[in-house]
Amino acid sequence: MLKLDFHPSGRHFLQIPGPSPVPDRILRAMSLPTIDHRGPEFGALGREILEKIKRVFKTQGPVIIYPASGTGAWEAALSNVLSPGDRVLMYETGQFATLWEKMARRLQLEPEFIGLPGYESWRHGVQADMIEARLKEDSGHEIKAVCVVHNETSTGVTSDIAAVRRAIDAAAHPALFIVDTISGLASADYRHDDWGVDVTVSGSQKGLMLPPGISFNAVSDKAIEASRHNRMPKSFWAWDEILEANQNGYWPYTPSTNLLYGLKESLDMLLGEGLENVLARHQRWAAGVRKAVEAWGLEIQCQDPAVYSPVLTGVVMPEGIDADEVRKIIYERFDLSLGTGLGKAKGKMFRIGHLGDCNDLTLIATLGGCEAGMKLAGVPLKGSGVTAALDYFASNPLKVAS
Ligand code: PLP
């Protein structure tokens, strides 16, 4: 057990799938003095951020920023466009889809939660054909919104959002399309406008490489129109006053000034590198980590290679081995944090995050901690995952597009 006054040497390896490691450049930006959030300097910062963030969501429309965790932005999305008693079609991909469905019930919506049978839903992406079939049955248009999670952080599955859009269109259904890309944005390909999403929900502590504390709603014209007539009680989350104040770069309340300094830095880093390069970097890391899992002879939580997540990989433990025991050994012996199995996946798997301030060698070290910890925990391994990943990284250099 670590004592509070004990400080281990070197850096902690924060390889959970968010909060992700924050680059020093962002930490330094956030350490600047807090300024007057009603002054001219802040207005210029606000305007710059609100413009640049659109490029990350790939939208021409507004992006609303809340001083809240991702859960707040989930609530904002539902409560701005829906009314109590509205039926919503939600798809079970894992723990985060499950929590969002629970929130919908608490907000007095009537969610219909569909998915593959049992645990299968936690090992595959959204089945767009099931959404299409359900919407086609709904000839009276009782369903007001379709809600899906893009990158399901509890399983490491990145669903095909364009396919869900096509399904809604094929059913000629007017439902709003609401997508959670809290852990997908800026690590996995995401296109709010091209995919016809009405509200996109995201958070700061994953691909944007910031600490937790701010979250986002990117909104379409159709969503803004719906927000003018919906009847869900709300005040703090209401888009109208925020959008009005945002026109001049301000907020109707005190925003998270220093997190916004960090966001400005993050946007400069991501856009400076080029989003395509950022996405390619994550795909390559994910492929290297999968090589390691394959060499260990273990299973990946996601059973459909077409939807493997570039953000994290879920590693399934053999029957009879408690994944949390393995994680505990890895944490205590190697100062490395891995994601726990959540909900239905509890004890069955752990999650390796490959997002945030990483590089090939931090990932090799992470895989080293996993490999050594699994050996100590008695997990039978076929071969060396570290060597397999190292070989993959060495023979597949990152191709940077200028
Ligand atoms: N949705 C997804 C996909 C997430 O990964 C998370 C958090 O990890 C949330 C929602 C909830 O966000 P928060 O914990 O920031 O409130």
Image: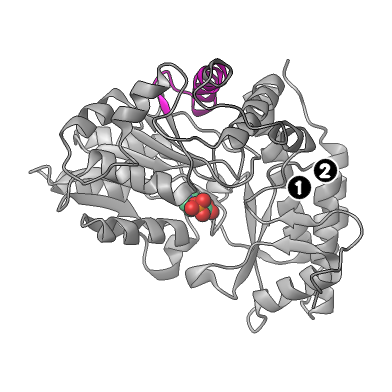
Task: Find numbered disc 1 in the image and state the secondary structure of the residue it sits on.
Answer: helix
* Residue 61 in magenta stretch: yes
Amino acid type at mark 2: Asp
Q: Nearer the viewer, mark 1 or mark 2?
A: 2
Q: Is residue 244 left or right of residue 383?
A: left
> Going by the picture, which residue comes out furthest to the bottom?
320
Q: Which residue is mark 2?
A: 360
Q: Are marks 1 and 2 in contact (CB under 8 Å)?
A: yes
Q: Position of residue 58 (x, y in %)?
A: 49, 24
**Picture residue at 41% right of the left edge, 48% below the top:** 72
Instruction: Give the magenta range.
Output: 44-63
Rendered view: 215 above or below 37: below
> Going by the picture, which residue comes out furthest to the left?
140
Q: Position of residue 167 (x, y in %)?
A: 30, 38
- Depth check: 228 or 360 in front? 228
Examine the image and state in which quarter residue 301 appears.
Answer: bottom right
Examine the image and state in which quarter residue 300 appears.
Answer: bottom right
Q: Which mark is residue 326?
A: none
Q: Is residue 311 left or right of residue 139?
A: right
Q: Which mark is residue 288?
A: 1
Q: Name the magenta segment's main secondary structure.
A: helix
**Picture residue at 22% right of the left edge, 43% below the top:** 82
Q: Position of residue 5 (x, y in %)?
A: 84, 69
Q: Position of residue 59 (x, y in %)?
A: 44, 22
Alpha carbon separation for disc pair 1 and 2: 9 Å
